[in-house]
Amino acid sequence: MGKDYVVKKQKSNSNGRAAFLSNLKFLGMSLVSNDTCVEARKKPWYAAVIIAVLSTIVAMSPVVYNYFSTTGGSFMNSPLYNMDNALVDFDATLADKKLSCKIQDSKLTIDSAAWKAAFPETTALGQKNPSNAYVHEFKVDTTVYPGASSSSASDSASLSSVPTDPYVTTETVTDFVVYWAGSTGFDEYYTNSVWGVASDFPKKDKKTTIFILGESGFKAYKLATSATTSALSSGSRIECQWNAPAIQGFDLATLSTTSSHGKTYSSSESLSTQTIASWKEIFADGYESTKYTSAWVMTGVFFGVYVGLALILGLTVFLMTRGKSNPFRIYTFWECQKIAYWAALAPAILSLIGFAFPAYAQLAYIFLFGLRVMWMSMRSLRPVYNN
């Protein structure tokens, strides 16, 4: 009896090992063979569901990583569009005007009356400044060549009464503006006090970087070229909070000489380098809470998108196999879903290229998964009729 038991047990282990290796081989073949994915319709339902969930998690990993690894300090990366020089002047102006901008209890406190006195309604170069903003401006001389772009006879006639010799015009350029919104919401202030005012300052068609400081946080628009926030790309705008522990008790007026983290700069570093480094800390700290909220939201969004994609592509397989004369019409709706689920793992693995190319992380899986199902529909699920 003992010998029979040992023999049966060894056979059982051998059969289990063989089944495991067979299933592992089948899984490996499904990565490269569409026919194997079609055959997978005969496999248990839970295997298809597990593969679908695993594929979704794998495909989401570069997307989630990119969102959680984002830092607010990247807003201050190149190109700066002269922001470095403008911020040096802004910090120096705060110090010269003795204007306190202290962060305490997750709020920025600025005396509105002192702010208006420091930044009057008319700038140093004579521009109207209705919102009492800090304005970084300079004059640019441009040489004009009359008639240089005219080619028709009518244009030549119209220019006959104006000087034909080149002349120089002077234009005032505004490339950086900082507003104090107080307790007003960012979107409301942006609409009513930035480009919503009648005087339209700064000009909508000019490239101007804008900072809006508020009590609870701040918002920045880099190289803003449109009157609406929705027209700006996500990399050109950022919203941060004053709730980071590292910046509590810090005064923005000291940024020109002091790091918000207490860092001591080398005397060999330029003032603009120190200033940009300090503001990077402010942006990085201020964006942390916003980053995690946004990252979790986007994680949920893309999980839903990728799960929905598997369901839609399963439906696509089902619809592609319908028809009175289609030999694959015997496949049920659930079998078609299982075919699509088994086909998901290879595109998910290939979508890991999103770690190297973050710009393609979100769309890589969608494109590759859809491409494989379409290819499978045209090759492995194409009706073939005998003469």
Image (spheres, rainbow, N blue to C red):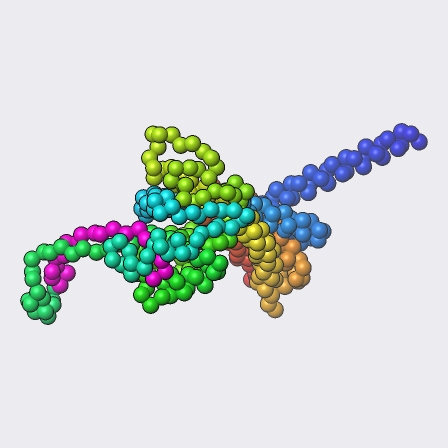
> What residue is at 66 percent from the left and 40 percent from the top?
24
Q: Quadrant of residue 127?
A: bottom left
Residue 132 lies in the magenta-colored region: yes
The relative height of residue 78 versus residue 139 in the rendered view (above or below) is: above
> What residue is at 18 percent from the left and 55 percent from the top?
170
Q: Does residue 237 appear in this view?
A: no
Residue 350 at x, y percent in the picture: 52, 45
Residue 143 lies in the magenta-colored region: yes
> What residue is at 81 percent from the left and 37 percent from the top?
12
Name the one closer to the observer, 351 or 345.
351
Q: In the picture, which quadrant includes the N terminus?
A: top right
- Which region of the structure is painted magenta? 130-150
The relative height of residue 304 versus residue 71 in the rendered view (above or below) is: below
Q: Is residue 165 left or right of residue 315?
A: left
Name the one closer to the observer, 26 or 361.
361
Residue 58 at x, y percent in the picture: 58, 45
The relative height of residue 323 versus residue 115 in the rendered view (above or below) is: below
Name the one closer to the observer, 111 or 32.
111
Residue 244 at x, y percent in the picture: 53, 45
Residue 134 at x, y percent in the picture: 35, 53
Q: Does residue 332 appear in this view?
A: yes
Q: In the picture, which quadrant includes the C terminus?
A: bottom right
